[in-house]
Image: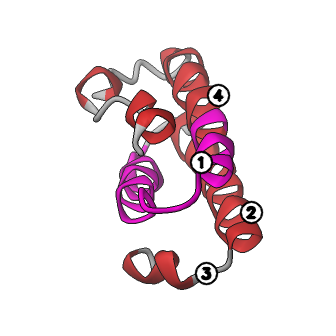
Amino acid sequence: MFVRSERLNSEAVVQFVRALCAVSLQEIGHRRPRVFALTKIVEIAHFNMDRIRLVRGALALTLTLTLTLTPTVGAGVGLRSGVGQLPAQGALSTAP
């Protein structure tokens, strides 16, 4: 499903990423945090780099908000996520 997200239309992939970001924040906010959805978000971003700039911009905004909130949400449960080790989401909006 994640690899094939590139087959979704533009609106669907943005909605999919938004929903996955919401799941990711819920996972991280648990007493025993998980980062499964967070890693899948990065994969989806990679698979959808060839989208038009408008779609990449929407994806980048969603990812930026999620990655910005991740340390805040995770800090409450002592999560030391590897957000700093994730590929820079800025590449989404600057790719040709």
Disc 1 is placed on an element classified as helix
**Which amino acid is tagged 3?**
Leu
Lower sequence index among marks 3 and 1? 3
**Label 3 to label 1, Cα distance in Å?**
16 Å
- Which of the two discs, 4 and 2, labels the residue nearer the N terminus? 2
C-alpha span from label 2 to label 1:
16 Å
Look at the image and say whether residue 30 sits in the magenta stretch: no
Alpha-carbon neighbours of circle 3 within 10 Å: few (<14), some, or many (≥20)?
few
**Nearest to the observer: residue 57 or residue 42:** 57
Indicate whether 21 appears above or below 17: above
- Residue that extends furthest to the front in the rendered view of this protein: 96
- Using residue 41 as the reference point, say whether residue 69 is left or right of it: right
Instruction: For label 1, count other residues whose C-alpha is less than 10 Å away and answer few (under 14), some (14-19) or many (20+).
Output: some
Q: Mark 4: give few (<14), some (14-19) or many (20+) Cα within 10 Å.
A: few
The residue that mark 2 highlights is 15
Residue, disc 4: 65
Q: Relative to 5, is 16 on the left or the right? A: right
The label on residue 95 is: none
The image shows residue 63, relative to residue 24, as above or below, that is above
User: What amino acid type should be assigned to the residue bearing mark 4?
Assistant: Leu
